[in-house]
Every structure is written in C-alpha cells, then in structure tokens.
Amino acid sequence: MIDQPITNPVLIFAIAMVIFLIAPIIMVRLKLPGIIGLILAGVVIGPNGIGLLDRDPTIVLLGTVGLLYIIFIAGLEIDLEGFRKYRRRSIIFGSLSFFIPCILGTGLGFALGYSVEASLLLGSLLGSHTLLAYPIASRLGISKNQAVTTTVGGTIMTDTFALLFLAVIASSLQGDLSPIFWVQMLGSLSVYVLLVLVIIPRLAKLFFRNISEGSTEFIFVMAILFVTAFFATVVGLEPIIGAFLAGLCLNRYILEQSPLMNRIKFVGNALFIPFFLLSVGMLMDIEVLLQQPEAWILAAGIVVFVQFGKYMAAWISGKMNGYSKEEIKLMFGLSVPQAVATLAATLVGFELGLFNSATVNAVIVMILITCIVGPYMVEKYSRTISIAEEQKPYKPNQLQERILIPLANPKTMESLLDLAFVLRGQSQEPLYPLTVVQKGNGTSESKVAEAEKMLGHAVTYAAGAQIPIQLLTRVDQNISRGVVRAIEETRISTIIIGWNGKLSTPQMIFGGILDQLLERTNEMVLVSKLGHPLNTTKRIIVVLPPGVNHKAGFFEAIRKIKTIAFGIGASVYAFVMKDTTDQYETVFQEIKPDVTSKFVSMKTWSELLENVLLMLKNDDLVIVVSARRGTIAWHPQLERLPRELSKAVPESFIMIYPQETEEYDMRGARGTAVPRTYLPYGQYED
C-alpha cells in the first residue's frame, strides 16, 4: 500500500510523466486542447482531489519555471517589427483589457460590501491575464499574426498595471503611501528596465559572436532568463515581467528556425509548461466550495465579468484595427486565462485581510474556468485562421521553393544552413544539401566518403532545428556541371553557395566553379561570405544597381532580402544607384514581410565604394542585387564589388543573382513587361 501523498521523488516524476503523456491524448480524442487535460489532471490527483500528489515546493518550483517559460517564449517569438509598427494597437488593447474588467470587478466588490482597498484589488486581479494558450497559437503557425502580436504586446501592460495596483494597495494598508514610495517604485522600475534593455543585448552579442556550441548556447539563454526574472523580484516586480523582457532582448539573437529555438521550445513544452498546468489544477479545492455556497455566487460573478470584460476589450480593439471575427475571438482566448499573477494578488489580499477563504476559492474557480475557456478558443480559432491563410490564392512570391546548398567547406556549413533556415521559413519543402566529388586520380571513393561525412554533420545540425533535409551527392568530371545536374534533377529554385574570397585569376568574379555556375543556370543564386554570425546582424546594407527593377527576378530578390531582415530582426538601408528611390520604396512596401527600411540615392559607384563601404560596422551585412554578365542591370562594378567586400569589415556579404527567364509576366516598377535582354560588353560610365 502506497502512502498518500506520495513523497518518493522518482515515483512523483514517473506519475507526472504518465499524466503528461496520457492526458493530452485523451483530450484530443474529446476534441479539446491538451492543456485542459493537464489542468483537470491536477484537480483530480492534487491535495484537494484524491490526494495522490501534494503541491509541494518541487511542484511549485517546476510550475513557476513553466510559467516563466511561457512568457519568455512569447517574448522570443513576438514580431518586434510588427510590435513597433503597431505598438499603438497593443497600448490600446492592453489598456482596455485591464481597465474594463478592473472597473467591473471593482463594482462587484462594492456590491458585495467589500472595502475600497479590497474592491480595487479584486478589480485589478481581473484585469491581468496569462498567455497560457500562447503555445497553441505558436504551434499552429500564427504567432506572427497581427492579432496575436497585439495581444502579446498588451500582456505586459495588463500585468504591470495589476502588480502596480497590488503594490500601491499593500503600501496604503501599511500607511506607507508617501511621495518617497512613489519615487522609489517608479525609479527602481525605470532603472531595472533600462539596465535589462542595455546589458542583455550586449552580453548576447558578445556571446553569440564567440561561442557557438549547442548546449552552451542553451545554458546561456536559461541563465539570462532566470537571472533577469530574479532581479525583477528584487525591484518589487513579478518574475514574469523579467522573463518577458529577457525574451524581448534575446528575440533578434535566437532565430525562429534554428536549433537553439527548437531546444528552448522542446524543453518547455515537454517538461516545464506541463508542470505549470498541473500545479494550477492542484489549487482547486472542491470541498471548500461545497461548504461555502457564497463562494459560488462570487465565482459566478467574477467569471462572467472577466469574460465579458476581456471580450469587450478584444471586440473594441479588433473593430478599431479591422481584425476579423476569428481574430477577435482569438484575442479573447489569449487574454482571458487567469493564472499566477491573479493568484499572487489573491493570496496577498488574503494575507492582508482583504479577502476571506470564500474569495480565494472563488478566484481559483475563475482561474480554472478561464484556463479551460482560453485554450479552447485559441485552439479553435487558430486553426480557422491558419486554414484560411493556407487557402488564400497563391501569388508568385508565395510559392514554396526548393533550396539547394552546395557544401565544400565544413567551416562554413553551419552559416550556410542558418541562411537557408531563415529563407525557408515555414515552408514544407526540405532543404537540399549537396556535395559534388570530382572524378580523377582514383580518389573518388575516399572523396565521396569525406563528402558523406560532411553531409552527416549537416543532418545533425538540421535535425536540431527540426528542418527536414534531403541529402544529395554527385560525382562528376566538372564540379559546376555536377551542381547544375542536381539543380535540374531536383527542380531547384534557389541556390545558396559560399565563397572563400579567393580568386584564381583577376578576370574572374568569384572563381572558376562559381562563375561557371552563374553562366549555366537561370535560377536565383545567393553567393555568400559571412564573417560574423547571422543572428548578430543589426543592419542590412542593400545595393540596387540601375535597371535592376526591370529584371524578371527582382521582386523575388526583394522578398528574399526582406525575409532575411525579418528573420534576424535587422533593419534595411538601401542604396539605389543612379536612380530615384520612389519606385523602389513602393515595391519594397508592397512585398511582405514588413521591415524597417530607408532608401538613399547614389549618383556614382565611386561614391558607394569610397564612402559607404568604408563605413561598415562589425554587425552589418551587405546584400547586393547583382546581375549575370550581359543581362539587364549588369555593370562592370558589380564584378568588382565582391573583391572589395571581401576586404571590408566584417567581410559579410551576399551577392544575389535573380532568376533569369526568357519571358515572364511580372511587371517592372514602371509598369512594363520586360523580357530577358542581353547587353553588349563594353565600357560603362561610372
């Protein structure tokens, strides 16, 4: 006979793992979110259920880590560019989402005869919310949706307001609501936020530039998360505020499609977040509710008010911003769950004598119900929005592509794959790493073995990011011909290839193999030389030669640039050669995704080479939209640029050669269809 509650740590962990496995499966069969199953399991096995497990310090610890994980991942995945662009929406929604439920809750408190302090505290705890269901939206691929970004941005406001209310009310009861209190509270908050926003990005940049080991990267991120969360408590804030700020600061350094992001999500979703959900369920005390009927009246009131208030906030904000009905309901589902911030305020109110046991249990009922309603709404409407996105008519720049990555140098393999991960995005197509072995001297067999070893490393690296790949090996007398053969056989649309910066003869652009590849292909080619980690890039310098907007692949090249900028969180600084910027800015704005950009017109190539390239920073990435020799937009300076860039700090650049076709139906920026045209060789003006 096993004593209850169970204290054996091995058995406790075993029971938890079984619950984490079975509960979501059962919920899926019932067509309910798996999150609900974990909460209900906590109710059943917890101290107020059958008493199988106690909500001991270990469960509380792991549950707290799980909550911080949820908030941290939300900060990591938030669309910073969209947040900056639509921050007004987040401010409006956050204000409405807090103050509407707060006013309703305060009125309920007065109606039930609560004191002024108790009524205000009751209202404030209804105004906060926890992004409990955010992992569902992330899993279904809509984390970048504007409605989701608005809700996540508003979360930091609602929780901050709620915690400030709590601090003010607690101080008022202790008779300490003096000017010194306000100065200390606002001063410490400002200093904390400022230090976090300044120090963490600097540490992250230094770390990722010098260390690239997988396990060390993960430990660094965890250290940043929990140290930042702890210091939030030091200045009187809840740790969730620190976790969210840590996520925001590391957002641009952890690429969405990367092994590190996959490790972070895997550990959270498999272990810590389920413990948090289990611990929330363990708070429910059904026996006390049965003994105190007034708790049900209060519970019904706050459940109705919190859901009405949160829905009104989502509805008003959604209507103001033109969101669909599904997006409004998605915002409601994300913002209605109440969890630790609400529970913390409730327990403090109980300790201060503002709330009785009936109030505490009524709040727990509200937490349980909202934690069921929220995930259900998010699961339902996230799927609806995701399916609607998939069913939109395809546009040329939305077609899934196949990316080939010819590999020759193990030292540059990871940087090329990182670039491919960013460009691939959410595509379902695998990546195609390729090695080509040159025949000759009877060494083909050993070279094939070496090539396969390098491809094995590529498999391991891509598996860490959960990116499917299809390995290709070719043996040919000519390496460039082997690459071309692979392109034709697998219907490749984009080639990402590295360059070591060395030339065999001065007349060549890159060297024999790359020059031959450009001559023999019409597909888009990205020739890259990355002198620093891609995720530390802050600014992308784009060079647009004259006439490039008439090329068939111009629009796709711009989309590639914006995809890279969006994926690494960088801004774009574009230089338009010998032309006005208006038409380029118009095209740039029409192509998704949205990134911060600035355009400057340059009169001469000399001005570009002598001024701009000499002022590059260590975290700049230069991207040149180039052209194959003899085609529209080709200029001799485009063949000089790779040599100049290979000597410039930080030696990080990409030469994009857009797709060339004989005919195409896309239109240039001036509105005329342009067939592929070859220009005669000769001297060009600077």
Image: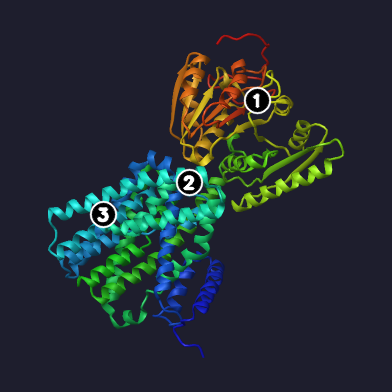
Q: Residue at x 51, y 44 (%)?
A: 210
For mark 1, give the secondary structure.
Answer: loop
Q: Earlier in the sequence, mark 3 or mark 1?
A: 3
Question: Residues under labels 2 and 1: Cα distance?
Answer: 46 Å
Query: Residue 28 lies in what quarter of the image?
Result: bottom right
The answer to whether one can see residue 359 in this image is yes
* Colouring scheme applied when the structure was drawn: rainbow
**Residue receiving disc 3:** 99
The residue wearing badge 2 is 207
Type of amino acid at the residue the image marks with label 1: Tyr
| Residue 623 picture location, percent across and down | 55, 29
Question: How busy is the neighbourhood of tag 3: few (under 14 within 10 Å), some, or many (20 plus)?
Answer: many
Q: Is residue 622 above or below residue 327?
A: above
Residue at 55% from the left image edge and 74% from the top image edge: 18
Q: Which mark is residue 237?
A: none
Q: Taking 409 as reference, is 191 left or right?
A: left
Amino acid on which disc 3 is placed: Phe
Looking at the picture, tell me which residue is in the foreground, 203 or 146: 203
**What residue is drawn where x is 70% and y is 28%?**
514
Which secondary structure lies at badge 3? helix
Report x, y in % for residue 15. 52, 76
Task: Indicate left or right for 210 with 81 as reference.
Answer: right
User: Mark 2 and mark 3: span between their CA atoms?
Assistant: 41 Å
Badge 2 marks a residue whose secondary structure is: helix
What is the CA distance from the residue labelled 3 to the residue labelled 1? 55 Å
- Where is mark 1, residue-wise? 664
Label 1: how many Cα within 10 Å (few below 14, some 14–19, many 20+) = some
Q: Is residue 648 above or below residue 185?
A: above
Q: Nearer the viewer, mark 2 or mark 3?
A: 2
